[in-house]
Amino acid sequence: MLIISSREFRENQKMYFDLVDQNEQIIVQRGKDKAYALTPITDTDRYFANPEVKKRIQHSIGQAEKGKVTTLKKSGIKKLLGV
């Protein structure tokens, strides 16, 4: 893990982004009491950040909590998948 100043980050952004891409943890210290972690965003992160996806997931969770679910046997799943 590397802890760097915001000034150091500004001066060498590409290098630090490249290190994050190589799974190095980078913390950018800003002042005495603020710090930020550099983290790459994956396609999964982008998917779940979509407000429509979040809305559909919340709706589905609500349905499940109310017992509005369908249980499939293994044979039914295979039939749906065409296996």
Image: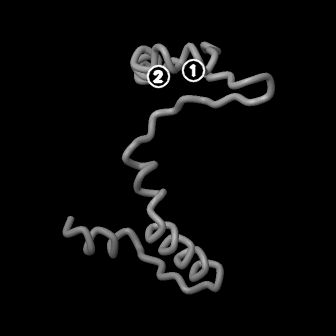
Q: Nearer the viewer, residue 73 or 19?
A: 19
Image check: 52 left or right of 4? left
Residue drawn at the location 64% of the way across and 31% of the way down: 36
Q: Nearer the viewer, residue 71 or 7?
A: 7
Residue 76, horizontal then vertical, whole percent: 33, 75
Image quarter (top left, top right, bottom left or bottom right) of the C terminus: bottom left
Assign a secondary structure to mark 2. helix
Residue drawn at the location 57% of the way across and 20% of the way down: 26
Amino acid type, label 1: Ile
Assign a secondary structure to mark 1. strand
Q: How many marks?
A: 2
Amino acid type, label 2: Val
Specify the label residue 63 is tagged with: none
Tell me if label 1 and label 2 are in contact, CB under 8 Å: yes
Image check: 82 left or right of 33? left
Q: Earlier in the sequence, mark 1 or mark 2?
A: 2
Q: Please say if 29 is above or below 50.
A: above
Q: Which residue is mark 1?
A: 26
Q: Residues within 10 Å of mark 2 (few under 14, many from 20)?
A: some
Q: Quadrant of residue 67?
A: bottom right
Q: Please say if 60 is above or below 45.
A: below
Q: Quadrant of residue 75?
A: bottom left
Q: Which residue is mark 2?
A: 20
User: What residue occupies the far right of the structure in this picture?
Assistant: 33
Residue 10, horizontal then vertical, whole percent: 51, 20
Residue 13, horizontal then vertical, whole percent: 45, 20
Q: Please say if 6 is above or below 45.
A: above
Residue drawn at the location 79% of the way across and 22% of the way down: 32
Q: Residues within 10 Å of mark 1 (few under 14, many from 20)?
A: some
